[in-house]
């Protein structure tokens, strides 16, 4: 019997009882659908995390000043200034793994125009900051080293601040705003960055030279850097090295004895990103395992139904053998039936999984990434399930004795 | 002298059930020539069904040789026997044994599917076989839409579609009324007269009367083996 004919006979047998066929494939459909949907969600989440951390800037370390300890109670990081401007200079010049560094002095202040105002986080920093943060300037230009040296009153606004004060498509470069009691000239607007991984709006910000910030907001430029230091390492590989190098440098400069805690703290964003990544990956693997179990159950369902089918069709098998069906004909017939059921279940499952993932993406705005290789593997796996769980019933059928089979009621 | 198509020599069949051995056939020899119409008679337990199963290559003898149409089939594998059944033999059963929810035409095509006959030739040959038994106008009916006699005729068409050397019929009229039985026996006689060897198993003397030779069996042995003048089956109405 040619293969096309075998397939035709198998499909006929399956379609003879559509409800049973549907229920049998349900296990596979749900298993495959779940795998596809969960992998899509997992991949989407992973991609989103990657994107978010890329938006923060790559190879970044954030150095925060130390904690205070008063009567045994430790204040949080930043409660005591321990970083100095000389520290910053040393980091820039003495650590080979550091590409560039910028100070970050921050305060929440109202930015006021003639008729509008908006309270935002104002950061005093140096020109390297925008490069470190991978943050292009959309309109105008950033402030320069000259502005820093001269403590000029220039300001770069984030897109949200511009939207709130001037409207969405305005170009406010050249106009004046007041920050606190000081007038500033707007010299640039940063490009839109969107939301951070924690839901914070990057574009709700403003940037001025740190010298201006120190003088106008902090009461003067003292020895201590009252803020954080942002560092960009030479490469992603050297980021941990840079962290170690800076730690050694600062401990030395601050005369921290061996065994004592650091009087500062360094946050390595790529480590945080990796940790997040790991978490998502573990989740995805776990969910995929659960879905795989469901595929297994689906396979058992197929084997069960095929065994019932063989018993029900014992007479039919006897007739086929009497008129000339060889054992391998019978085996192939039932194996193809099992395979058809499982692969059909696989395809329906793919449609179901893709549909669910897409619906979730639209309804809940979850990030979803549909991966063609996961789809191919799932369909392949469902075929494998059909063969593995169909072979036993098919063999049983092919080994029936024709005389007994013909006598079967 | 016509050549022997069924050559059974010293056939023994023993079933081992627990401690008791059942000798269904006890050293039986049978020679059937091409073109005979043989009826094998006996009561239940005589060994006639076992004999039929062995002749039909559905079962293998414990001892003895079976030469069918010149081939020694005694030692053949299950697959080889299936091929022999497909090309050399045709079966007709008491319970018709048609595939349900399948048309008459597809039922008749079944042996051709296993005989690797292509689609168009299959349809042609199956249609011709159905015409030969007078059911050309019922090709697309399912068995549950046919009477008992019609179903048996479809079964006969299926048995002859591969142009076998021997047709084996196991109580073919057992499930039919007397009128239909005569119609069916008329078809067998028609096939016999056209040159096919027919071997029929029955426990009814009225049915055995239509054959040209009657073999009586009892307790796994042949009691008697006589040729006779067959009773003519006269069917009512025209027949193809």
Image (cartoon, coloured by chain):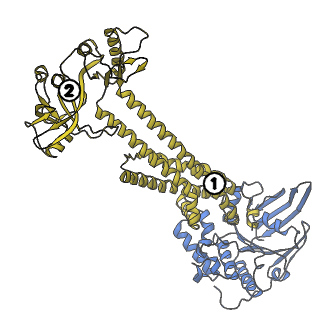
**Residue at the front extreme, as displayed:** A71
Q: Nearer the viewer, residue A294 or B154?
A: A294
Residue matched to label 1: A303
Q: Residue at x 75, y 77 (%)?
A: B172
Q: Nearer the viewer, residue B138 or A162?
A: A162
What chain does badge 2 belong to? A
Q: Residue A306: x and y, percent?
A: 64, 58
Residue matched to label 2: A124
Helix, strand or loop under label 2: strand
User: Residue A125 falls in which quadrant of the image?
Assistant: top left
Label 1, residues with CA under 10 Å away: few <14, some 14-19, many ≥20: many
Labels in figure, total: 2
Residues under labels 2 and 1: Cα distance? Answer: 70 Å
What chain does badge 1 belong to? A
Are labels 2 and 1 assigned to the same chain? Answer: yes
Q: Residue at x 55, y 59 (%)?
A: A2
- The quadrant of the rendering that contains the N terminus of chain A is bottom right
| The color chain A is rendered in | yellow
Q: Which of the two discs, 2 and 1, labels the residue nearer the N terminus?
A: 2
Determine if residue A343 is in view: yes
User: Residue B147 falls in which quadrant of the image?
Assistant: bottom right
Say if A246 sits above or below A20 in the image: above
Chain appearing in blue on the rendered image: B
Q: Residue A10: x and y, percent?
A: 57, 62
Label 2 or label 1, whichever lies nearer to me, is 2
Determine if residue A10 is in view: no
Q: Residue at x 31, y 24 (%)?
A: A62
**Residue at the left extreme, as displayed:** A174
Q: Residue A154: x and y, percent?
A: 11, 29
Say if B43 sits above or below A251 in the image: below
Say if A386 sits above or below A92 in the image: below
């Amino acid at each position: 019997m040619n293969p096309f004919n075998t397939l035709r006979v198998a499909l006929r047998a399956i379609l003879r009882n559509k409800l049973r066929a549907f229920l049998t494939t349900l296990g596979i459909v749900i298993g495959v659908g779940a795998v596809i949907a969960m992998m899509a969600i997992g991949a989407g989440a992973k991609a989103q995390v990657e994107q978010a951390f890329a938006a923060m800037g790559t190879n970044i370390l954030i150095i925060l000043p130390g904690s205070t300890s008063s009567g045994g109670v430790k204040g949080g990081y930043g409660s005591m200034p321990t970083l100095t401007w000389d520290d910053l200079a040393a980091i820039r010049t003495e650590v080979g793994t550091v590409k560039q560094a910028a100070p970050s002095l921050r305060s929440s202040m109202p930015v006021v125009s003639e008729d509008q105002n908006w309270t935002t986080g104002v950061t005093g920093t140096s020109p390297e900051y925008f490069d470190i943060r991978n943050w292009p300037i959309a309109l105008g230009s950033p402030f320069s080293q000259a502005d820093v040296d001269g403590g000029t009153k220039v300001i770069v606004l984030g897109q949200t601040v511009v939207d709130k004060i001037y409207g969405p498509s305005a170009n406010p470069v050249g106009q004046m705003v007041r920050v606190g009691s000081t007038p500033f000239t707007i010299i640039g607007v940063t490009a839109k960055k969107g939301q951070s991984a924690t839901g914070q709006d990057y574009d709700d910000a403003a940037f001025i030279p740190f010298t201006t910030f120190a003088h106008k907001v902090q009461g003067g430029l003292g020895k201590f850097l009252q803020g954080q230091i942002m560092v960009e390492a030479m490469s992603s590989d050297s980021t941990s090295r840079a962290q170690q190098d800076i730690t050694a440098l600062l401990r030395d400069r601050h005369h921290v004895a061996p065994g004592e805690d650091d009087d500062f703290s360094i946050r390595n964003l790529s480590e945080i990103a990796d940790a997040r990544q790991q978490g998502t990956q573990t989740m995805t693997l776990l969910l995929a395992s659960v879905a795989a179990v469901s595929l297994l159950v689906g396979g058992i369902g197929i084997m069960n139904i095929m065994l019932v089918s063989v018993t029900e069709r014992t007479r039919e098998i006897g007739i086929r053998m009497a008129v000339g069906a060889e054992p391998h004909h019978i085996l192939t017939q039932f194996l193809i039936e099992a395979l058809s059921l499982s692969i059909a279940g696989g395809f329906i499952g793919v449609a179901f999984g893709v549909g669910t993932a897409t619906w979730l993406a639209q309804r809940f705005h979850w990030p979803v990434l549909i991966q063609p290789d996961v789809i191919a593997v799932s369909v392949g796996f469902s075929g494998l399930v059909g063969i593995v769980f169909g072979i036993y019933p098919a063999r049983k059928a092919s080994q029936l004795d024709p005389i007994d089979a013909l006598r079967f009621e | 002298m016509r050549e022997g198509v069924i050559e059974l020599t010293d056939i023994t069949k023993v079933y081992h059930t627990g401690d008791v051995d059942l000798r269904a056939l006890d050293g039986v020899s049978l020679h059937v020539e091409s073109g005979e119409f043989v009826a094998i008679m006996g009561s239940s337990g005589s060994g006639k069904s076992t004999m039929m199963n062995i002749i039909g290559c559905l079962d293998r003898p414990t001892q003895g040789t079976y030469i069918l149409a010149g081939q020694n089939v005694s030692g053949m594998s299950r697959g080889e026997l299936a091929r022999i059944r497909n090309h050399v033999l045709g079966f007709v059963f008491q319970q018709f044994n048609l595939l349900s929810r399948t048309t008459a035409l597809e039922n008749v095509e079944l042996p051709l599917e296993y005989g690797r006959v292509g689609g168009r030739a299959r349809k042609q040959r199956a249609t011709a076989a159905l015409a030969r038994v007078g059911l050309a106008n019922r090709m697309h009916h399912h068995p549950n839409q046919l009477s008992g006699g019609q179903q048996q005729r479809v079964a006969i068409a299926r048995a002859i579609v591969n142009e076998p050397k021997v047709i084996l019929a196991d109580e073919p009229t057992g499930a039919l009324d007397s009128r239909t039985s005569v119609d069916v026996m008329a078809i067998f006689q028609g096939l016999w007269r056209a040159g096919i060897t027919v071997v029929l198993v029955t426990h009814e003397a009225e049915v055995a009367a239509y054959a040209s030779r009657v073999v009586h069996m009892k307790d796994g042995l042949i009691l008697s083996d006589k040729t006779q003048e067959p009773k003519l089956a006269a069917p009512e109405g025209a027949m193809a």
